């Protein structure tokens, strides 16, 4: 039996934002990929984590905790979100290693069920280190998706120009033509 497809409208963002994007809007209603372990399996597979971690109830609970923490940090404030993200990060660490290719790092977890949650929280720290001003929420008022702006000039506003950007332009055009 083929694996279920990923129903989300935006995928491929960095792990932390991809976790936030497991909730999205469709026809005015919030959709949630992580309502059960089947959805968790889809998310793990989409991020190449399915070979390392199991989509079970405990892992799902930890991933939901990380998603809530990241949402508070990204959409709220770092002051509010930092203790929640830190609580997830407390379940793992980076161990320095020496590999045949040279110095390396390896993530270690108190319990493997914390792995995906910890990796998403750690990824958020990396994004903050790289370019915190490029972590964005879609500018469309009816969208709850997030993205990391990789455009050259850093002015991306929409999760997708084809979806939200086009809807916003169509709305503005309709408002202009309606008044004339």
Image: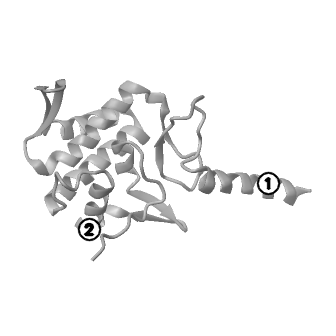
* Picture quarter with the C terminus: bottom right
> Closest to the observer: 72 or 110?
110
Residue at image coords 68%, 52%:
168
Which class describes the residues within 10 Å of circle 2: few (<14), some (14-19), or many (20+)? some
> Closest to the observer: 15 or 173?
15
Which class describes the residues within 10 Å of circle 1: few (<14), some (14-19), or many (20+)? few
**Mark 1, residue position:** 173
**Mark 2, residue position:** 38
Residue at image coords 25%, 39%:
84
Q: Residue furthest top?
A: 103
Above/below status of 92 relative to 141: above
Q: Position of residue 90 (x, y in %)?
A: 15, 36
Alpha carbons under labels 1 and 2: distance apart = 41 Å
Q: Position of residue 96 (x, y in %)?
A: 13, 25
Above/below status of 110 relative to 25: above
Name the N-terminal-most of marks 1 and 2. 2
Q: Position of residue 174 (x, y in %)?
A: 79, 58
Q: Residue furthest front?
A: 100
Q: How many marks?
A: 2
* Picture quarter with the N terminus: bottom left
């Amino acid at each position: 039996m083929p694996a279920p497809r990923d129903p989300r409208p935006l995928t491929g963002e960095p792990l932390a934002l991809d976790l936030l994007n497991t909730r999205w809007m469709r026809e005015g209603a919030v959709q949630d990929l992580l309502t059960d372990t089947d959805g968790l399996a889809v998310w793990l597979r989409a991020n190449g984590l399915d070979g390392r971690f199991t989509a079970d109830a405990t892992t799902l609970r930890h991933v939901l905790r990380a998603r809530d923490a990241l949402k508070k940090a990204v959409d709220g404030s770092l002051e509010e979100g930092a203790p929640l993200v830190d609580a997830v990060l407390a379940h793992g660490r980076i161990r320095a290693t020496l590999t045949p290719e040279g110095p390396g790092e390896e993530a270690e977890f108190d319990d493997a069920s914390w792995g995906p949650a910890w990796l998403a929280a750690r990824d958020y720290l990396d994004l903050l280190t790289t370019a915190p001003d490029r972590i964005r929420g879609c500018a469309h008022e009816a969208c709850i998706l997030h993205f990391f702006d990789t455009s050259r000039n850093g002015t991306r506003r929409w999760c997708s120009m084809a979806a939200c950007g086009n809807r916003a332009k169509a709305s503005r055009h309709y408002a202009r033509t309606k008044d004339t």
